[in-house]
Image (tube, rainbow, N blue to C red):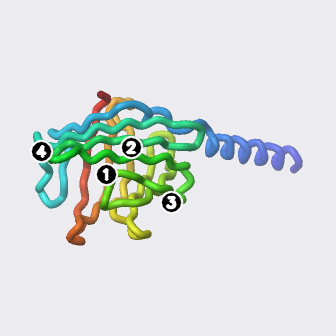
């Protein structure tokens, strides 16, 4: 009986060390949107027009995010930055009038949940997942427009 308890304790320690393992480093790097593979549920994805570059780094349990969206030609690009502990708690986000905080949590080695909020209201909820042996980042989520209408989206990014 004692041997079974010892094996169970070792198994639990192994699971705990996996939960505290290094950040999901496969997400680190620069990503550029893939207009051809991406879509929005309302059918209005700006195919061939969307221009979004994401830079992701990790420092211990922090996800450090920087993006530049210059889709709206003739207007200044939208630059969004945050440094969030991946613990599901709110952290400040800068650069967007639509969001003021972000909540990030790791779901697995190849999945991250990212929520963007304004005044505590979830505006965008997304699951990030690595595909194609880490060569592709897929974001699937639901976002609410400034008019209060929601749509789902599936966006793909290639390393760039």
Task: State yes or no: discs 2 and 4 in contact (Cβ < 8 Å).
Answer: no
Instruction: Tell me the CA gap for discs 1 and 3.
Output: 20 Å
Residue found at the very far right of the displayed protein: 2
Instruction: Tell me the CA gap for discs 2 and 1.
Output: 8 Å
Res 38 → quadrant: top left
- 140 to the left or right of 75: right
Q: Secondary structure at mark 1?
A: strand
Residue 132 visible to an observer of this rendering: no
Front residue of 57/129: it is 57
- 44 to the left or right of 131: left
Q: Earlier in the sequence, mark 4 or mark 1?
A: 4
Residue at label 1?
140
Residue at label 3?
90
Q: Earlier in the sequence, mark 1 or mark 3?
A: 3
Front residue of 80/38: it is 80
Q: x%, y% of residue 130? A: 38, 38
Residue at label 4?
74
Answer above or below: position of 67 versus 43: above
Answer above or below: position of 4 versus 42: above
Task: State yes or no: discs 2 and 1 in contact (Cβ < 8 Å).
Answer: yes
Q: Secondary structure at mark 2?
A: strand
Q: x%, y% of residue 117? A: 39, 63
Q: Earlier in the sequence, mark 3 or mark 4?
A: 4
């Amino acid at each position: 009986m004692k041997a079974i308890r010892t094996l169970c304790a070792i198994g639990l320690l192994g699971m705990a060390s996996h939960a505290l393992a290094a950040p999901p480093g496969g997400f680190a790097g620069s990503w550029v949107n893939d207009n051809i593979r991406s879509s929005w549920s309302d059918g209005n994805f700006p195919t061939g027009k969307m221009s979004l570059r994401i830079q992701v780094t990790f420092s211990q349990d922090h996800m450090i995010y920087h993006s530049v969206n210059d889709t709206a030609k003739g207007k200044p690009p939208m630059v969004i930055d945050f440094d969030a502990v991946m613990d599901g708690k709110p952290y400040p986000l800068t650069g967007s009038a639509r969001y003021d905080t972000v909540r990030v949590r790791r779901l697995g080695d190849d999945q991250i949940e990212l929520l963007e909020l304004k005044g505590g209201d979830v505006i965008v909820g997304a699951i990030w997942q690595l595909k194609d042996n880490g060569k592709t980042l897929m974001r699937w989520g639901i976002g609410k427009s400034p008019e209060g209408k929601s749509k789902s989206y599936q966006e793909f990014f290639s390393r760039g």
